Image: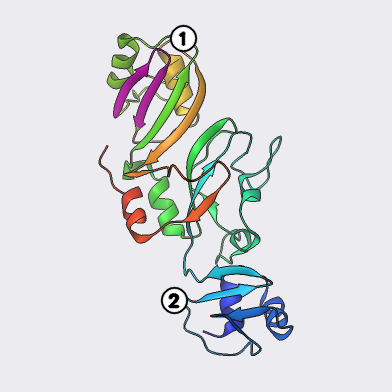
Amino acid sequence: MQLQDLLYSQGFGPRRVCLGLIQQGLVTVSGQPATDPYEDVTPEGLAFTVEGTHWTYHAKAYLLLHKPAGYECSQKPSAWPSIYALLPGPLRQRPVKGGQPGVQAIGRLDQDTTGLLLLSDDGAFIHKMSSPKHHVPRVYQLTTADPVDDRQVQRLLAGVVLDDSPKPVRAAACVATGSHTLDLTLTEGKYHQVKRMLAAVGNRVTALHRARIGQLALPADLAPGEWRWLGEGELAAVQDKKA
């Protein structure tokens, strides 16, 4: 792959901009200055810098973000800042054939919801992880306005009817972890599902945090607002259907 094409594929701008970055001496490859935009390079695992920004080539982007409260999962936020503002420019500008540039959030968390959020530019992966047919478990930790009792837990496990469908929606697992706290596992995704399920059993969610997708837990060392690349093992873990 030509060096200017590699920079373009990673989101560092149109090809003419990438060509100019190289010609101006603003790119280094494996620690050495790069001056030829047409140089053939082996992309896999290639480390380089652009204007001092360190980067490693990834053919597809698979990311984990610790979403903080007060951010919208939207490219065009209405009242709160966008989660995309937490990502570096190249991830927001990666070229995607036939779609909107940059990585996309896989599912949405409300602005007041925190926790694990996946992003990618791989359309097949996004579709697979978004499809309710895939049944990947998602574990939510929630705080409730009123005490949680066994009746509420059993109703959530048995299934509750929401206002958009007569078909009951069931929790794959539900465990009271305190007088006002609950761990809830879902294998399908509906609009405001957790909040609506708690409302259906006579309670109300006051705080909501997504702690796990598949078998991948939110890393304890990833602070709110921080992101990182997913490794191959973690990609397998997020697709693991074991509840």
**What amino acid type is highlighted by mark number 2?**
Glu
Name which residue lies at 52% across and 40% down.
108
Q: Is residue 238 magenta?
A: no
What SS does tag 1 mark?
loop
Magenta region's main secondary structure? strand
Percent of width and height locating residue 148: 38, 12
The residue pinned by badge 2 equals 44
Name which residue lies at 39% across and 48% down.
129
Distance of label 1 from label 2 (alpha carbons) = 53 Å
Name which residue lies at 62% across and 64% down.
90
Find residue 170 and report its image quarter.
top left
Magenta residue span = 172-185
Compared with 101, 137 (above or below) is above
**What amino acid type is highlighted by mark number 1?**
Asp
In the rendered image, the residue lying farthest to the left is 242
Name which residue lies at 41% across and 31% down.
140
Percent of width and height locating residue 102: 59, 59
Percent of width and height locating residue 130: 42, 46
In this rendering, would 58 be left or right of 33?
A: left
Compared with 132, 101 (above or below) is below
What SS does tag 2 mark?
loop
The answer to whether residue 211 of the structure is visible from this angle is: yes
Compared with 35, 136 (above or below) is above
Which quadrant is home to the C terminus? top left
Find residue 96 and report its image quarter.
bottom right
The answer to whether residue 163 of the structure is visible from this angle is: no
The residue pinned by badge 1 equals 146
Local crowd size for mark 1, using a 10 Å CA cut-off: few (<14), some (14–19), many (≥20): some
Q: What's the mark number on residue 33?
A: none
Local crowd size for mark 2, using a 10 Å CA cut-off: few (<14), some (14–19), many (≥20): few
